[in-house]
Amino acid sequence: MVTAAHIDGGRPLSAETVAALAAACDRAEDAAGGGVLVVHVTGAPHGDWLGGLTVKLVNRWEQAVRRLERLPAVTVAAATGDCGGAALDALLATDHRIAAPGTRLVPALQAGLVWPGMALFRLARQAPGAAAVRQAVLFGTPIAAADALALHLVHEVADDPGAAVAAAVARAATVPGAELAIRRQLTLDAPGAGFEDALGSHLAAVDRTLRRTAEASS
């Protein structure tokens, strides 16, 4: 089952934005096997966009994005135009990211300073070395689609994003969401885990896989 969410980074962050993402995650989790969640992202903050923001609201949003990042389902992002704010947050939390030509990743600015949200953490963690995104995280320099592809922040730049999304959904249709979530978490934990700690988690995943294989063949 394919479900969809639409995140407009040009709109001020609100409780409705949080609820919309949470509802999309609910639908994906309710789907048999986890399904596929396609997140359409576009838009970047402009003007005085901090009005009405509170730490409580930002925390709720960051928790919703973290849930997206750990969802027991395949997540695919389709990005168009400038993507900043909530759109950039959601994009960086998905498994497979497709950008239309002309897409830019745009860290949000307020009074000349980059917004210190978790997008900075994900940019620095996911790019091959923090120096590669230094101009973006310090000064808000937009990252063009081709550069984002080279930095592995997006995985495809497609002239026909709709067709690329359809192909990604078809590839993901046979992937069990719970099993994908385990492998995703092992990958996310790897940079900060020592060998002994990682070994236990990987052996548990191996045992789970062997049990599933035995059950399927019996």
Image (cartoon, rainbow, N blue to C red):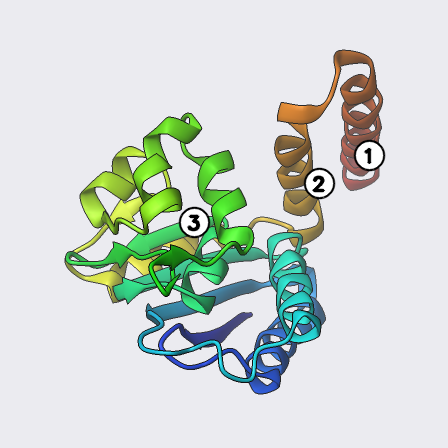
Instruction: For marks 2 and 1, give the one nearer the viewer.
Output: 2
- Residue 93 visible to an observer of this rendering: no
| Amino acid at the residue labelled 3 | His
Provide the residue designation for mark 1: 208
Q: Residue at x 21, y 48 (%)?
A: 144
Instruction: For marks 3 and 1, give the one nearer the viewer.
Output: 3
Residue 10 screen position, x and y as percent: 35, 77
Please tell me in which quadrant of the rendered image residue 135 appears. top left
Q: Quadrant of the N terminus?
A: bottom right
Circle 2 sits in a helix, a strand or a loop, which is it? Answer: helix
Residue 27 screen position, x and y as percent: 64, 75
Which one is nearer the viewer's eye here, 118 or 48?
Answer: 48
Badge 3: few (under 14), some or many (20 or more) residues near its Cα, within 10 Å? Answer: many
**Mark-to-mark CA distance, 3 and 1:** 25 Å
Which one is nearer the viewer's eye here, 32 or 114?
Answer: 114
**Mark-to-mark CA distance, 3 and 2:** 16 Å
Provide the residue designation for mark 3: 96
| Amino acid at the residue labelled 2 | Ile
| Amino acid at the residue labelled 1 | Arg
Which one is nearer the viewer's eye here, 100 or 83?
Answer: 83
Residue farthest top in this picture: 195
**Mark-to-mark CA distance, 2 and 1:** 10 Å
Circle 1 sits in a helix, a strand or a loop, which is it? Answer: helix
Q: Residue at x 67, y 69 (%)?
A: 55
Provide the residue designation for mark 2: 182
